[in-house]
Image (tube, rainbow, N blue to C red):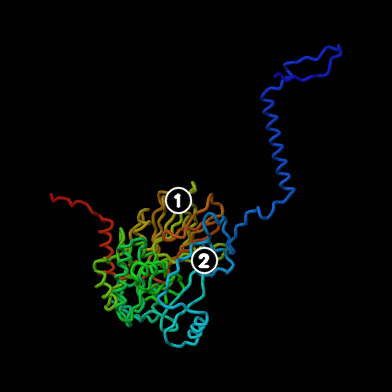
Amino acid sequence: MILCSFPPSNASGSSTSCSSHHLLSPSRLLQGTRNFQISAIFLVLILLNAFPTPSAWRAPPLPRLASPFRPMYTRVQRPFIPPISNALPDDDFQPEREKPPTYPRPWPPFTAEEEEGVEEKEAAGEGGHYYIIEEEERVMMRREVIVVEGTEPHPRRARFELHKRWQSVTSVDVVEDGQILGGTKKGLPEQTLLRWQESPRNVLLLMKRGSHDILQRVADITNFLQAREGVRVLVERQVKYDLLDSFDIHVAELYGARDRSHHAVDLVITLGGDGLLMHANWLFQKSAPIILPVNLGSLGFLLPFEYDDIYPTIERVLTQDVDLTMRMRLRCRIIRNETVVMDLVVMNDAVVERGSSPYLASLDCFCNGQYVTTVQADGLIIATPTGSTAYSMSAGGSMMHPGIQALLLTPICPHSLSFRPLVFPDSAVISLCMPLDVRSHAWVSFDGRFRHRLMDGDILEVSNSEYPLPTVTHRNVTADWFRALNKAFNFNMRTRQKPL
């Protein structure tokens, strides 16, 4: 079929004829179709705006965090980590998570009247067997319920003595409430001896999850400890359920709250790797109890004890004098707009890195308020002597004896040939400031956890914590450290030169 246009007749009155320049080509037809489609789309949009959508069709709005420090990203990515020291308001958003399974408790559940009676007994300070059931509090975006069982209105740790020796000077400290403090003018002692004044009552068992063999060993140790008079075994929540299902063993339960747990635990036994020791550090952000680290992991650099000798070792720790390693810890605070938004105590290191940004991380470094340098690198590591053999060592930092009180500053791939690792005294307060003219933001993580974004103008303040982490040594601090270097790292292993 031929399409023609019929223009008006000319003056001569000749008949109308088809002309080739009046034919509609396919390209013109396609352009007209597109214009019609665009016009139809605009018409639909106008109609949708003219008539509001029913509320039933609308997607519900996402709840927002009721926090004074609102993140710059949505809840679909990474949840905002609130400060540990401050409880969140009740109307704050909490992410949905699976509820733990319900299991029968080893004690009968309390009614509302009985719980009120328990609170009255605690307030009156009466003796007798009781339970302390505190209100729910939120720790790191999780609701935690603290349940402590005991025979005293205010649970405390067993009393012990610490015999500290600096060369020829020896001092004896009697610790009544189990709170071991450090940071004295003399620094950490060369040798610290633990001597119990009272028998330990509460022993916390921490295990590496996901292994039935380790769970079996935890069950055996639990039976061994429960056979001792006056010793009470505590475990974490899911381990309690696993022991109840697999071995029908009833133990007390320790929830993950940091404000109450450090008052009730006398001894911690870790059954796993080095990461489990860092997990114990997170459980006790303030004063930490005595920790007996047992190696059931792959490397075990910080774990001098093996499982084959676990029962004689536990007996010796509970009844005899033992040497301790007082491991220095770092207090890390993030300050935003002159307000502390995060306050943590870490055992290994705090790492600031550029993340996925193609630009270098830029940080202004200060020590005790004195400007040091502007760091332009892939990142920066602030490590303790314990953490000096971790990420810092891989980045070229020195290995430090755990008995030294110092902070190690190690750059990660600096854009300068003269930037070498620095060592600061334990009295130093290192501040890393994000300049306002940086090309991209930076990220900070603490012991490989709680990765947090640093915004323009944020300050990361790192200092020596007043609460060291006491761990039991096998022989002494120096012998255990060199043994770990030779065993885990094959330190300076080479074929010996032949004599001439």
Where, quadrant-wise, is the N terminus in this rendering?
Answer: top right
Of labels 2 and 1, earlier in sequence is 2
Name the element at disc 2: loop
Say which residue label 2 marks: 83
Q: Nearer the viewer, residue 454 or 214?
A: 214
Q: Amino acid at mark 1?
A: Ala
Residue 390 or 233: which is nearer the viewer? 233
* 39 displayed left or right of 262: right
On screen, residue 306 above or below 16: below
Separation (CA) of disc 2 from disc 1 = 28 Å
Q: SS at mark 1?
A: strand
Is residue 470 among what the camera can see?
A: no
The answer to whether 108 appears left or right of 401 in the picture is right
In the rendered structure, find residue 357 and report the number of the disc placed on it: none
Figure check: 360 above or below 275: above
Query: The residue under label 2 is which amino acid type?
Result: Pro
- Relative to the observer, which residue lies in front, 33 or 488? 33
Q: Is residue 467 in sight in this rendering?
A: yes
Per the image, the residue denoted by label 1 is: 377
Q: Position of residue 353 (x, y in %)?
A: 46, 53
Q: Residues within 10 Å of mark 1 (few under 14, many from 20)?
A: many
Viewer-proximal residue among 125 and 81 = 125
